[in-house]
Every structure is written in structure tokens, then in C-alpha cells.
Image (spheres, helix red, strand yellow):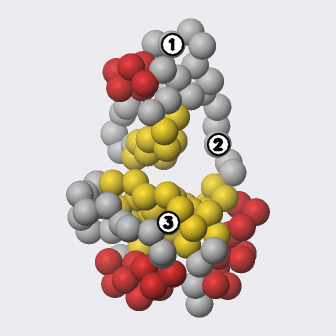
Amino acid sequence: MASPEALDAAPWREPTVVLRFAPDDAFVIGATGIDISDEHAIAEEETGFVGAWLTPDELGERVIPHIEWPLPNARPALGQGFIAGVPCKLWLTGDRALLLCPVPYAHELTERLR
């Protein structure tokens, strides 16, 4: 967590995936070091989520039928809400999607998406 301006200016290195959960909250996949120009920033390793990359077919067959909120039309985009009754985040790109779920709910989500 940091000021939105500091997150906007952060020099994220490839091949990271930067998900903005909120204007002042970034979840960075693949980062090995973080350089944020905000003295009040909180930058910690996050181990509270599990994720799975999905093909468009997997997304359409297994996940979308369990979503009751509108998916963003633009890509890339981050969607957040309940999937099969479980709080999740969905990172959508042109050719794949990343389904993120809090670790305590991962088993429940897996069972509900079968």
C-alpha cells in the first residue's frame, strides 16, 4: 500500500503483473524487489492468495457461469466479486485470465467450480 501517485510512478520490472486492488493498493506478481517513493508505504510479501491461469475456454466453461456481476469489457482489466459465492479477483487479459482466491477459501472454490 502506498499513495496512488507513488504506485503510478513505481518502476515495476518485467515480467511482473501489477494488479491495482484499489488506487492505493497494488498486488504485484513476480516482483523480487520493490522501490516505492512513499515513506509511508507498506510493502510486504503477500502469501494470502492462490491463483490459477485460465484459458478463455476454461474461463467460459468453469468460471463465468458462476459470476453474477458484470465483467469489464476492456482488457486488461481486474474484476472483483463473488465467484460461486466465494470472494475472488479475476485478472482478464486478451488471451488468458488469472483467478485469484484467498487461501482459506481455495478448497471451497475448487469444489464449487467442478
Which of the image's four quarters has the N terminus?
top right
Which of the image's four quarters has the C terminus?
bottom right
Q: Amino acid at mark 3?
A: Leu
Task: Find the distance from the CA under tag 2 to the CA under tag 1.
Answer: 19 Å
Q: Residue at x 51, y 13 (%)?
A: 38
| Badge 3: residue crowd in 10 Å (few <14, some 14–19, many ≥20) | many
Picture disc at residue 38: 1
Q: Secondary structure at mark 2?
A: loop
Q: Amino acid at mark 2?
A: Glu
The mark lying in front, picked from 2 and 3, is 3
The location of residue 27, given as percent across then percent down, is 51, 42
Q: Residue at x 43, y 58 (%)?
A: 79
Question: Horizontally, is 34 left or right of 110 in the view?
Answer: left
Q: Secondary structure at mark 3?
A: strand
**The image quarter in which residue 43 lies:** top right
The location of residue 52, given as percent across then percent down, is 51, 68
User: Residue most toward the top?
Assistant: 39
Q: Where is mark 3, residue-wise?
A: 99
Task: Find the distance from the CA under tag 2 to the CA under tag 3.
Answer: 16 Å
Q: How many marks?
A: 3
The location of residue 41, given as percent across then percent down, is 58, 19
The location of residue 107, given as percent across then percent down, is 72, 75
Task: Find the distance from the CA under tag 3 to the CA under tag 1.
Answer: 29 Å
N-terminal label among 3 and 1? 1
Q: Residue at x 71, y 77 (%)?
A: 108
Q: Where is mark 2, residue-wise?
A: 46
